[in-house]
Amino acid sequence: MTPNSPSTGSGPRSTGSGPNRRTFLASSGLAVLAAAGGAPLLTACGGGGPKNEGATTGKKLKNLLPAYVAPDLVTPDIPAENGSSAGFTKALPAARLKTSVPERLGRGAEFTVMSPIWGNVPPRGNPYWTAMDEAAGVRVTWQNQQGDTYGQKLGAVLASSGVPDAVVVPGWELTGKIPSAIAHKFADLGPFLSGDEVKKYPNLAAIPTGAWQRSVFGGKLRGLPMPSATTPNIAPFHRTDLFEKEGLEAPTSAREFHDLCKQLNAPRSKVWACGDMTWAAWHIFGVLPEKPYYWKLVDGRLVNRYETDEYLEALEWSRKLYSAGFVHPDAKAETGNIGDLCAAGKVWMYCHDLSDWYGKAAVQRVDDKTFRMEAFDYFAPDGGAPTLYARPPADIWTFISEKADEKTVRDILALANFTAAPYGSKEQRLRMYGVEGVHHTLENGVLTKNGKGNNEVFSTYEYLASPAPFIAYADLPDVTRGMVGWQQRQGAHTRKPLFHGMMIIEPTRYTELNAEFEDLEKDVVRGRRKVSDVRRAASDWRSGGGDKLRDWYQKLLDDTGDSAF
Amino acid sequence: MAQSTVRPPAARRDAAPAEAAVPPRASSRVPLRHRLRRDRVLLLMVLPALLLLLVFHYVPLIGNVVAFQDYDPYIADNAFQAMSQSPWIGFEHFRHMAEDRLFWQAVRNTLAIFAIQLALFFPVPVLLALFVHSFARPRVRAVAQAVLYLPHFFSWVLVITVFQQMFGGAGLIAQVLRDHGHEGFDLMTDPGLFKFLITFELIWKDAGWGVIVFLAALAAVGPDLYEAAAMDGAGRWRRIWHIQLPALRPVVALLLVLQVGNALTVGFEQILLQRTAVGPTASEVLDTYVWNTGLDNGNFGYGAAIGIVKGVFGLLMVLGANKAAHLMGEQGVYKR
C-alpha cells in the first residue's frame, strides 16, 4: 500500500464501479503450496489434471523459494505487527536518503510491460518513465490498461500470440482459465531466483518468503510478488469529525450499528446512514474468506463458506439494513462513489479498501483542514472481539513471458529489484514521487506531488515487485498512524484460515461452481431473493460438484496438511 | 421516385418480372472483363465494406468450431493452434444449454425486452419524423433535429447516470416527493419495471437518431403530391395518412425485418451497467450471459455455442419476417 496520486486517492481496489467490485469479490488464489513431512509433491488431486492443477509443497517448494535476506537499510517509524504494514511518517530530504541499488543492474534491454492503471495513461517518453528507465538501466514500453476492465484485456492478450514481455496479474483476475494461461505462457524464474540466486537482486531477496510461496504456479516459481499485509483490507469508515460534533460513538456490536443507522438515517435531508455493508458483514460475522481459503474443519469434516451459519447471518444482517432503508440508493444501484458521498456528509458510514482512508483525506483536506475520516474497529455480532481471517501475503504478481530471452529476463528482474527498494531509499523516492522539482517538492518536511506528478507518477512500477508491505504518507502522518494502528488492532484478532498462504489451483471443472453466489448475495441483501434461496443454492452447489470439490480438498489436506511446510 | 413509393402493390408485382428479366440477359451478353471495367468505380466503392465484412464477420466464423470443443485458448501460442489442440466434445455444450436454467432465463428476458422495445420504441421515430417534417421553417426543423440527435452521442454510462439522478432513490423526483411528505421512489432498482426502464432509456437516447432515415424517406416525396392533395381538399391528417405514411411504408417494413433479425440482440452495455441494480433474474439477456459465462468465467466453447444458436435463430427470424413482408406486398430486405 503506497501513495498514489491524491487526485485518485486510491490503490487498485478503491474505485466503486460494478466490474471492479465484482472482480474483487471473485477472490484470488488458485494454487496450493502444501507440504507433508517435507516430501516433494506436485499433487494433482483431481488425477492427472492440466499442467497448472494441484499443489507444490514440502522439499520441492523449499528448493524453489528464494533465500530471504532481511533488509537493514531503514527502520520504520511504526514497526509491522500482527501482520500489519510498517508505517513511515516522515519524508527525508533527498540528500539523506539511502542508496539501495548502488550499481545499475539493467543492461539496456528493451521490453514491454502490460499493467493495470487506475487513472489516465501518461504520455510516452514522459520525464518520470525516462528517469526510471535511466536509473534502472532498462527501456520499458508500457502497455497500461484501465484497472477496472483489466481482466477483459488480460484474457484476450494471453490468448493471443503477442504476449508482452512482462504482464501484471492481480489475484482477483485469476478466474476462469487464466491460471492455466500462467503455467503455459510464462517463464520459470527458478533458475534466476531460487535459493541464493536471488542474492544478485538484494531487494528481491528482502521480500518475505510468504509472498514468494504464493508465487509458485504449476510447480515453478513464475511470479514476482507484490507483498501485502495479512490484516483485513476492507475497512468500515465513518466521518470521525462529524461523529464527534454530534456526540456519537462508533458502534461496537451489530445491534448498535443497526440502532445507530436508525438514529442517523434522514432521506428527507438527502442523508443516508450507510452504503452497502456486506463486505464489512463478512468480517463482523466471522465469515470464511473466498476461494481457495473457504474451508474450515467442523468435527473433522471440511465445511465450505457457503454452508456456514455465519454466511447466512451476515447476509441477513446486510439485508435488514437495506430493507430498513438505511442504505444509500446509489449503493443499491451500485452507481457513483459512496466514499465521495461519505466525504460530502451524505452517507454516515461505508466500507471500502483501507487505502480510501488516505485517498479521501488527501483530497478533502485541501479545502477542509479539520476533515477526519477513520475506520472503526470490527466487532463480533454481539460485541467483543471479532473472528477475522488473515489475507494472503501477496495478491498481485508480474510474470515474464516464456519467450523472453535471458537478457530481457535479467533486465526485468533488475527493474523489479529497483522498484522493490525500501521506503527511505533514493530508488523508492523516485518510484513513488518522481523527480524532485519536476514531479514533487519537499518543503518543511512536507512532500507534495505537483500537477505533473499527479498526472505522470501513477502506481504501475510497484506491481513489478515491492518491498515488504508499508504505509508511507509523509504528507498526512496522522493518517499513516491511523491506518497502521487500525491494521494492528484488527491483526490481533486475525487467525489463519485453512491452507493459508498456499497457492491452490482447483481443477478447471469446478471453475463455474461458485459463479452464482456473487449474484445471489447481491440479490439477497437487496431483498430480491430470500435467505432460504441461499440454502437451496448451497444444496445445489453440493450436488453440482461441491461435494466432489470437498473430497478434492480433503485429499489435499490429508496429503499435505494445512500449511506449506 | 415518389411515384414508385406510392405505387399500388399490384402495379409493382406486374413490373417486377420485367425488371428482373432484363439485367441477367444484358449481363450475359457483356463479357466479364468489360463489366468489370464498366463498374470498376462502383466495385471499388463497395470493396472496403466487403473487406470489413470478410475480416470481421466471415473470418471469425472459423472460431465457431470451439462450440464443439472444451476450448482452452491458453494452451498454445495462437488461437488456431489452441483450436487444434483442444479436445472435441461434440454437442455437449448444446446439450448443456438445453438444461441450463440460467440460459433459458436469459432467453426469456431477451424476448420480453425485444417485444417491449418493438411495441414501444419502434413507432417513436416514425412519429417524431412526421412531427419534425411538419415544421415549415428550415431553421426550426434544424434545431429540432439537432436536439433530437444529441442524446445519441452520449455514452450509456452518462445516460444511466442522468436517469439515476432523475429517477433514482436519491434522485430529483424522489426528493421532490419526499419534500411533499410522500414516500421516496426508485425506478432504477425495481426489477419489475426494468424492461420498461431500459426501453425508456433507449427511446431517450436513440429515437431521435432513428428519425434520420424516415426524414430522408419523407424528403423524397415530391411536392407535387402535396399540392395535388391540397387541391383535392385534403387536410393535414389526410396528407399524413395518404401520402406520408405510404411513403414511409417500405422503410418501415425494411427496418422491421432487420429489427426482427436482431431480436436476440437487445443491448449489452446498457444492461450490463444496470445488472446489479435489478439483479440477473430481471436483467440477464443472452449477450450479457455469453459475456459472463463465456468471457468472464472462461467457458469460451459454451459462449460460442450460444452465439451459434443466436445466429441461427436470427437468420430464421429474418427469413420469416421477410416472407411476411413479401406477403404484405412489401419488398423487405431483398426482392423475391
Image (cartoon, coloured by chain):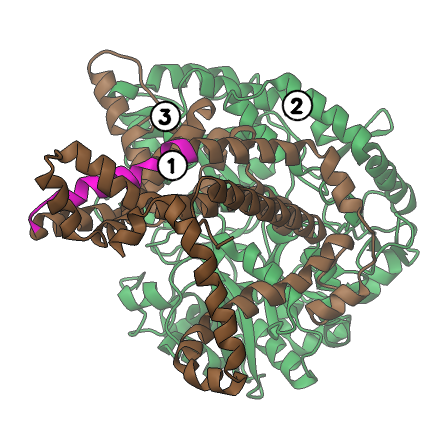
Chain colours: A green, B brown
From where the camera sits, is residue A371 visible? no
Q: Which element type, helix, strand or loop, lies under badge 1?
A: helix
Residue at the (53%, 65%) spot, across then down: A115
> In the image, what residue type sits under mark 2?
Val
Task: Write the residue at 62% across / 75% down.
Answer: A413
Q: Nearer the viewer, residue A127 or A483?
A: A127
Q: Could you tell me residue B106's position as x and y percent? A: 59, 35
Q: Quadrant of residue A118?
A: bottom left
Q: Work out whether residue A166 or residue A358 is closer to the camera in this orientation and state it.
A: A166
- Camera-near label (3 vs 2) is 3
**Residue on which disc 3 sits:** B187
3 and 2 marks in contact (CB < 8 Å): no
Secondary structure of the residue carrying tag 3 is helix
Cα distance between the residues tagged 3 and 2: 26 Å
- Please indicate whether residue B103 sits to the left or right of residue A268 in the image: right
Give the number of the disc on residue A338: 1
Crowd rating for badge 3 (residues with CA inside 10 Å; few <14, some 14–19, many 20+): many
CA gap between label 1 and label 3 equals 19 Å
The subunit carrying tag 1 is: A
In the displayed structure, A456 sits above or below B292; it is below
Discs 1 and 3 share one subunit = no
